[in-house]
Structure formats: structure tokens, C-alpha cells
Amino acid sequence: MNEKLDVLSKVQLKAINIKEGPAMIIAGPGSGKTKVIASRIATLINKHDVDPSNILAMTFTNKAADEMRERCESLTQCENINIFTFHSLSALLLRRYGLKIGIDQNFTIFDDGDQLRVIKKVFKDANKDPKKLPFKASTLLNEISNFKNKNIRFNEVSKLEDNDYSELISDFYKRYEVELKNSNALDFDDLLVRTSDLLNSSSEIRDMLEDRYKYLLVDEFQDTNKIQMDISIKLSEKNKNIFVVGDPDQSIYSWRNAEPRNLLDFQKFFPGVEIIKLDQNYRSTKSIISVADELISHNDERFERELWTENIQGNQAVLITAKNPKLEAEFVTREINYLIGNGYSPEQIAVMYRVNSQSRSMEDLLKEWNISYRLIGAVSFRERREIKDLLSYFSILINPNDEISLSRIINTPRRAISDKTFDLIRSAYGKQDKYSGLLNFILSKPWNENIKLTPRAEKGLEEFADIISNLIGKIKKLNPEIMIQEILDKSKYLKYLEDDPDFDNRLRNIEELRIKAREIGFEIEDPYFKNMEFVQRFSLINNDESINNSDSGENKEKVTLITLHQAKGLEYSVVFIIGFEQGLLPHARSLENLSEMEEERRICYVGITRAKERIYLSNCSQRFTWNNSGKNMFSQTQLPSQFLSEIPANLFKTAEYSNSGEIIFVERKFEKKIFNKNNEKKILDNNFNVSDVVVHKVFGEGVILNISKENEEELLIKFEDYDKPKLILSAFGSLSKKIEIDDQEFDYLNGLDVSNSEDDFSEYFDD
């Protein structure tokens, strides 16, 4: 990659030439923010003679960090620039200095799957039936994560609300933390929390890091949470040379505790900050920019600005309405087929949606039309069984206290070591104080110490202990790639996989793991630390950035199916966004919350601005759902998304896709009862009548008892699952009439005959 600073715009050049003091760059989508960050680093090194080791850059994904590193190396010819994700930097600092706050350097990083196993173990040890608890294991983990990101410890939870629920959460939170400590493990949130603890508790460490990292650059600053903001401030308090890049309009991770106010309020933390806006978009056509800009202008929580581009006008945006998701998917598939036939490569095309379940209808139709696709958000590379198994072997060799990894592989491959046997071993270990760590206890082979085991179980444990004993001696001597082969050989893992019907794919995944092992830590000489870095690298991969989702050769010539959240940071020539319906986009839970509604609008904005040449929006007039009991399916009338009313109609080609596959152009005005930014109501005629059977997105099915004569937008509804009637404002669009499905229609929708017709229709949309 040959980057040149002279291709930068005047505004970009102004940003990169800031040497001293705080700076905030408001970078719109497609405005070249990565180029600006890399060029700023190059300018500091090449022009201002800043030592590369004095520069620290942080971003959110490994992919973004790798891209930034590649650009910087091309511009500077330096290979020692410090570019990290927040989590990888935190892991590095804790391994180096964690002992100051009681953290051993060999700690394991537990991912989502590991955390779930810990919680299930907590339930079991507490003799609690998960089915009788007021929350699921995943819900409890989300609660704990939210507390950690707000820096609330387990002993503080019960103080927030004095009730049985809080007491129960607090108790499980405490038990969860004890399990992590016993396993010498940290979860993702702990990496940030404990790093913040380290910086706040040790002025010595903080001063040392500030002296080392004199210049701090942070990408995607709108996605930082409270703790990441705290870390950024602590690392820049002395020098004040903090350069943050972000866009409040692209803040879409509040569910991860991201605080878009961190960017909006940045000047409060660093008075005198220089603010530069990158408004020029280099990615999209004028038509696409117009649609996106009109939509996002309805948000209040933002910096006022307008995107602009010197690109061509391009094709007008397309808005298609179909009767149901099957027909919506048929339209999209036919259009994709046409586009591929007219010069577009499949990898240039993406279908985006708000929730994962929407992909199903698209998958079915693409398969029928023999169009290859990749589904982003399927099982990530690190979560695949064979990868997780091998990494668990590495984990227990590095951290003998990692009981979660131990429980995963002690009977993998099968050695007749049942869960009951494992519990017996755990129980015996708990009654002694001679050995440190369950694995060390097993390696001592205490079979005759009051542990009643079957001959098969004893033989299996003997075999396992011998395998691990052999491998422990090699983890400190052999590089990761060779260690993989040693584990495979000693455990006979490949033989174990031979009967797996997906053996070929699993073997390819293991080969991919070898390749990644080969790339790890060329600058690290010690094999033990190289192996540690190898495991950590995979532990720090986010769920939505798996290796399998990269632009590898196997993903060429494939259409991408992806959620709007996962699409951030990507770009495609053609983008379809399906499900533009009230309650879906925007999501139902946002309909009565202005702050959440703004985030939904940002999610939509992110999706639209992924498109370079063509943008298609689609919705359904009816969508199938189940009632609250889950027993009866019905067709629910869908209202068009209120976002469509916020975009001028002249920016769309608007059409309907009929049951027979015809395109019928229509003129449509979308008027709704919504709350705009001034809390004023717009009008929508829902034609609700007393006694109508309706469906609410939250409360389920009910009957209208009364419609207020003074305020026709206020409905009194008796819902099936609630004793007392509720007053509902139809303005929020969370209510629709119930329409029963007759058998004939249901059969039609489940067995729709879709043929590869040559009667394509995209020519209707070409400008």
C-alpha cells in the first residue's frame, strides 16, 4: 500500500498537522478517517521527529487496528508503532503490572461461552434450579456486565435497590467473581475495569505510561464507554496530546454501554480543544448522501453538519413494499440476480437487517436461485468446537487454575470421564490444601485417596494426566504452530474427529488456526509468551469480527447477509436494507423512548451510508408472528417505518412488488403520529374502532374498549395477559390490527413457487 500525504484535502491536512494539545475530529461516514489517523501518526514521526514508541493509537476491533498498522507502516517505514484495541492494551498492561493489584500474569480471558459455563456452574454449586430463577443465565451475565461497565461492584448492587431481586443478583455476582478469581481468569469487562483500577491506584504506573505515551490517538471515540473514557483521560492528563476521531451520528452501541456523550462532551474534559469536521464523503453517490443526511437531521444529539460529495448523482434510492417477507425476499433476490448478470460481483452486494431472524427468508430464496452467500453473525471462528477445544488445551497448559477450560477438554476426546466423575474429583480437591489448582491435583493422580472411580474412569484420567504432563513440558519450549501439532498428536484429536460428518470443514478450520499461529508474535522470542499471546489474540476477537468474516478467498463471489450493527465500518457497491417497518426499524422497544429512537435512526443511517452506488429499502405490509402463548400464528399488519416520513418522497423511486412478481410504481406519502424532536405529533389514520382485535409490540393481543373522544390518539385496551386495561397512544406506532391467516394463504406463503424467471425488472430502477 503506497499512501501519500499530498492526496489529502485541505481539511484533512489541517487535522493531521495539529501537533500539540487536544483535538477532536468529527468524521462523517466515508470521510477517510483511517487515512487521517494514519497520516497524523506519520506527520508526528516524519515531520516533528516524534519517537514512534511515544505514540499510542487505540481503536475497537482487531481488523481496524491491523488496517491502521498497515497504513502507518507504509507511510513511516516504522514497525514499532503502538496500535491496540482498548482490550488488547488492557491485557498487555495487566500482564505487565497486574501484580500491583493482585492479578497474576498467566490469567485466562474468558469469552462469552466461558462466562456462560461459569454461571451454570454457579447455579449448580448454589443448588439453584435455573428454571425457577427470575432470569436466564444470559440475562444475569448482561446484568453483571452492565454493573462492571458502570464500575459497580457486587457488594454495591444490593444498596441500589432494597429488594429480593437485587439481593439475588448481588449474590450471584459475588459467586461469579469468586469463580473467576479461583480460575485466575478475567472476563472482557474485567480487562477494562481492572486497568482503570490500576491507573487510578498507582500514580507510579500512570506517570510511567504518560511519559512513555506522549501522544494518544483514539478512533471511533463515540463508541467509548465510561471506563474507556476514564482510561483515555488518565493516559493524557499530563501531556494533553489527545487526538480523538468519531461521529455521534454513528454511535450505535448503547447496549454495550457506549456513551456518545463522551464525544459530545469532550471539550468539557479538555478545554480549548480544537474541533475539525470532516464533511466530505468519498464513498457514496449524491443520491445516497441526500437520503442519509435528511434522515439523520431529525436527531438532536449530534453536531450540526451536512455531508457532501463530489461523486456523481447516481441512481435514485429505491423503496419497495411487498405483502410479506417471502415476497420481499423474492424481490431482493431477483434484483440481486439482475445486478450480478449486469456486471456486479456478489461480494459487492449486501443485504442488511435489524435483527438476525430476518435473514431466514433471504437464505431460503438465495438457495433457490443458487446464489452463494455468507451469513455474518453465524458461529464465529473461535466458537467452533474444534477451535475452542484446541485453545482450551493451550489455556490450561498456561493457566492450570482455568477450571472452565479443564472441564471442556478433560473428556475431549472421550475418555469415559463423565460429569459425575469430574464432580467427584472437584469435591476431593476442595477437601485438601496440598495442591494449588484442580489440574495440579489431577496430575498427582490421587485415585486412591478416598475417590471411588470406575476402572474406565480411572484409566481415562490416567491417560489425560499423562497427556497434559507431557505437554506442560513443551508449552515453554515450542512455538504455537508446533504446539498445535503436539496437542493433536498426543490427544489423538484428529482421529476423534474422523466420524464427524463435518470433518472436512473442521480440518480446514484447524489448518486456518495453524496459519494464524504462524503469524503470532514475530517480535516475541520466548515461546511461552508467544503461546500466551496466541491464546490472548483469539480471546480478544469480538463476536462480530471472527476470522471467518474477513475478506478471505472463500468469501469471494458471495453476497453478504449482515445485521446493521455488524455492517459498521464496511462498504458495498449495492446495499439492500429490508424490514423498514415500525417496530422493526425502528425497533419496538425504542418507540416510546426518544433517546433510543435517536439510536435507531443512527443505526439506519449507518446502514444507508455503507452503500457506494445503489441503495434499496424495502418493507412488508404484513408480517407473521406468534401470540404471547406461542401457540397461534397470525398475520400482523405492519406500519411503514416512521423514518420513511422523515425523508422527502422525491428522493425515492417508490413501488410495490405484487404477488405475481410485477413492479407497480406508486406515489406515497408517509404520514404518522410520531414524536419528532420537538415532541410534536404528526397524524396517522390507523382506522382503529372499538372492539377491534389488535396486537401491541410489548403487551401482545388485546381488544379496544374505548377511543377517547377528546383525544382520538388515546385507546383503552384490555390485553389478554393483563388484568387491568391499559391506555395506549397510537402515536408510537406500536399497535396494529390483527388479521387471521386462512389455510390457503398460509400454504401459499410456505410453498411459494419461485422460478428463475428471465423477466427481470431492474431496468425500471436504472437512471
Image (tube, rainbow, N blue to C red):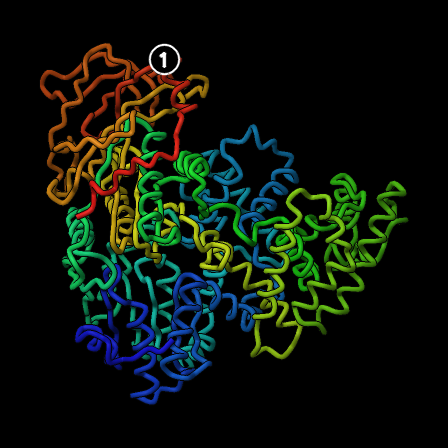
Of 534 and 446, the residue lying toward us: 534
- Quadrant in which the N terminus appears: bottom left
Q: Residue at x 46, y 61 (%)?
A: 192
Furthest-front residue in view? Answer: 758
The spot of residue 268 in percent (x, y) is 23, 65
Q: Residue at x 34, y 47 (%)?
A: 341
Q: How many marks?
A: 1
Dividing the picture into quarters, in which one does residue 582 lie?
top left
* Residue 190 seen by the camera: no
Q: Residue furthest bottom?
A: 49
Q: Is residue 457 left or right of residue 97?
A: right
Q: Nearer the viewer, residue 270 or 35?
A: 35
Q: Where residue 92 sits in the image (x, y, percent)?
A: 52, 70
**Please, is residue 411 above or below residue 705 in the view?**
below
- Residue 100 image offset from top left, x and y in percent: 55, 70
Left or right, 474 with reference to 211: right
Alpha-carbon neighbours of circle 1 within 10 Å: few (<14), some, or many (≥20)? few
Q: Residue at x 36, y 81 (%)?
A: 75
Q: SS for tag 1?
A: loop
What kind of residue is marked 1?
Answer: Asp
> According to the image, label 1 marks what residue?
742
Q: Percent from the top left, x then y, of residue 6?
A: 24, 80
433 lies left or right of 640: right
Residue at 83% x, 48% y is 460
Q: Is residue 58 visible?
A: yes
Where is residue 71, by image quadrant?
bottom left
In the displayed structure, 591 sits above or below 283; it is above
